[in-house]
Amino acid sequence: MPGLLPFDGAAVTIREAANEVARGVAQSGDARQVASYADAASKSQPSVVNIFTSKEVRSQRNPLMDDPLFRRFFGDRFPTDNRPQRVSNLGSGVIVSEDGFILTNHHVVEAADEIQVALSNGLILEAKVVGTDPETDLAVLKVKREKMPAITFAKSDMQRVGDVVLAIGNPFGVGQTVTMGIISALGRSHLGINTFENYIQTDAAINPGNSGGALVDVAGNLVGVNTAIFSRSGGNLGIGFAIPISIVRQVMREIIAHGVVTRGWVGIEVQEITPEVAESFGLKSTDGALIAGVLRSGPADRAGIRPGDVLIAVDGKPVKDSSSLLNLIAVLPPNKVVPLSLIRAQKEMQLPVTIEKRPPMQRGVQE
């Protein structure tokens, strides 16, 4: 017969005391504060809006309608002319000022002739486009309403890989949704999404409809604007991208002030320096950008820059790769003369270049 353990009154007393403490914590509500992001969500959700757009497009004539046999059997079941049709789209946006300015993605409102904004309290307002910047995929809208719940901006240089973030938007039109993840990477580029790429990568669930919505930190501050996902199915696979607050703030200010974003340009095409290229040019590292082409009579051509030169610095700031070169030149104001440091025939030299205004929507890597 199994023996009975001796009675241990002390152990029972300690166990009961522990249970009593646990019950007290649960009743007081302190236990709910552990690992909860409710405060961050409640702070930022009122600043995130749903955006509904529509535009008129004309259907293409079905070429089969020119076939008499096809028309005999199907008659006029298919349109025979370019009849206008309305196409709807949905996305998200972020209120950035109390007087009604709203940030979203360019692709959410592109070519739209009707834009409606639904606030978190259900109020629906008509919105107008202040300006867009296709090269960063950002746009600014304006609604006629005061005392809007504007979001708080995070500091530009405080984000770290591993930080917890919340993505807020309107995925698939189901309504405002909050998802949680971490910052998976910073400075993502060479993705072929936009001209200027410096993305925050996150595994917070981002789906169609989230575009233009907020990516916020655990304090509810805006760290980025959600813009794209990596997906083969169209749904979330744990790789989403947001435009960082540093770019968002710069583009937003220029659009609100001038309606457009003005960037510098020198008229060159560049390519990355691979280890093989570095070896063939006798370079000590792969830092910099190889000039593959120079626009005839452009600023770089007039300054004496040639294909085959390796740009290593712009106005004293080092060039890491082609993306960093693009960004360094873009922030320069037109008509400013800046020195470009380069390597030609294994010798370093500097050439002064007069910056010009970047032509609109240059495709490819052209600075």
Image (spheres, rainbow, N blue to C red):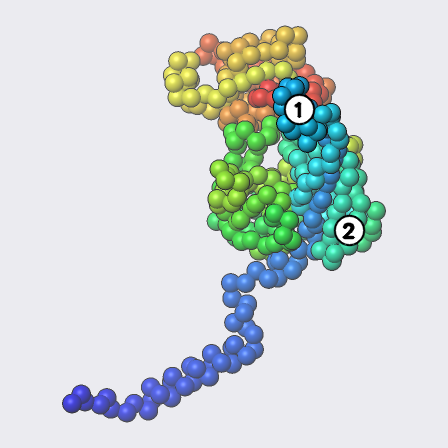
- Measured along the vertical axis of the image, is residue 22 above or below residue 172? below
Q: Quadrant of residue 51?
A: top right
Which-is-in-front pick, marks 2 and 1?
Answer: 1
Instruction: Name above or below for residue 167 compared with residue 193.
Output: below
Badge 2 amino acid:
Ile
Residue type, numbered disc 1: Arg
Question: Helix, strand, or loop for circle 2?
Answer: strand
Asked whether residue 59 is in view, the answer is no
Residue 23 in sight in this render: yes
Seen in the image, is 191 located left or right of residue 70? left
Residue at image position (56%, 24%) is 325
Tag 1 secondary structure: helix
Q: Nearer the viewer, residue 48 or 261?
A: 48
Is 76 on the left or on the right of 241, as rendered?
Answer: right
Q: Residue at x 50, y 17 (%)?
A: 290
Name the residue: 18% across, 88% down.
2
Q: Which residue in the rendered view is the most extreme toward the left?
A: 1
Tell me how far mark 2 sits from mark 1, CA to CA.
45 Å
Q: Please tell me the numbered disc located at residue 127.
A: none
Q: At 59% across and 62% down in the image, what residue appears?
A: 38
Estimate the x, y position of residue 302 in percent, counting from the top left: 65, 8
| Location of residue 172 with respect to 134 vertically, above or below | below
Residue marked by disc 1 = 71
Task: State the image quarter where residue 89 is shown.
Answer: top right
Q: Of the numbered discs in the image, which one, if any, rests on residue 124?
A: 2
Which quadrant: the N terminus? Answer: bottom left
Quadrant (top left/top right/bottom left/bottom right) for the C terminus: top right
Mark found first going from the N terminus, 2 or 1: 1
Q: Are marks 2 and 1 in contact (CB under 8 Å)?
A: no
